[in-house]
Image (cartoon, grey):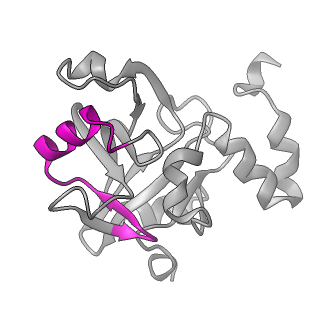
Amino acid sequence: MISEKLKKGHLLIAEPSIIGDLSFNRSVILLADHNKEGSIGFIINKPLKYTINDLIPEIDANFKIYNGGPVEQDNLYFIHNIPDLIPNSVEISNGIYWGGDFESTKDLINDGSISKNNIRFFLGYTGWEENQLENEMQGNSWIIADNNYKNKIIGKSTTHFWKEQIIELGGDYLIWSNAPENPYLN
């Protein structure tokens, strides 16, 4: 069963057939939670034009903000790989943690204890209700992949990350690696 294959920490790679969907076209999502009630993830390869300082002026850093997904885009979320520094973090897997004490996080960024390779901020998240993600999997919307980068994914993933993942899949996917984002414009 597909839901047994899905677990937090996996990557969901958008199938090339997802075209015209502004949120999910060429997205790679880190699955932060998956259980019988539903799933939550963050799109990790869609940077926005904002930095953390743009949104929270008292943070003196220019860490990029990413589009985490279409749900609650007026809320800021973060993942990190430094649970010893950020209290109340929740482990996703592979040394990646979600959230934690935000006041401590602000102080740690300002004093230089946290770098952009330790933390990633998102506006919004991606969410699925019970069985919704499984139905999308059966509809071939997503490819499940292990997160081979472990907690280094925070500094690794870029706007080209989807293409890199498609190339790694190989086979029939290789043709999509050089296709324009919108094939109708070709």
- Is 105 magenta? The answer is yes
Q: Quadrant of residue 17?
A: top right
Q: Residue 112 at x, y = what percent?
A: 33, 37
Q: Residue at x 42, y 68 (%)?
A: 95
Residue at x-position 81% and y-position 41%: 177
Which residues are the magenta region? 92-114
- Does residue 101 appear to the left or right of 20 in the view shown? left
Which quarter of the image is occupied by the C terminus? top right
Above or below for 32 versus 48: below
Residue 13 located left or right of residue 118 = right
Residue 138 appears at what percent x and percent y? Answer: 55, 66
Q: Residue at x 46, y 82 (%)?
A: 4
Q: Residue 31: tell me if it is visible.
A: yes
Give the x, y percent position of residue 10.
Answer: 50, 66
Residue 114 location, quadrant: top left
Q: Is residue 123 magenta?
A: no
Relative vertical location of residue 113 with respect to residue 81 in this rendering, above or below: above
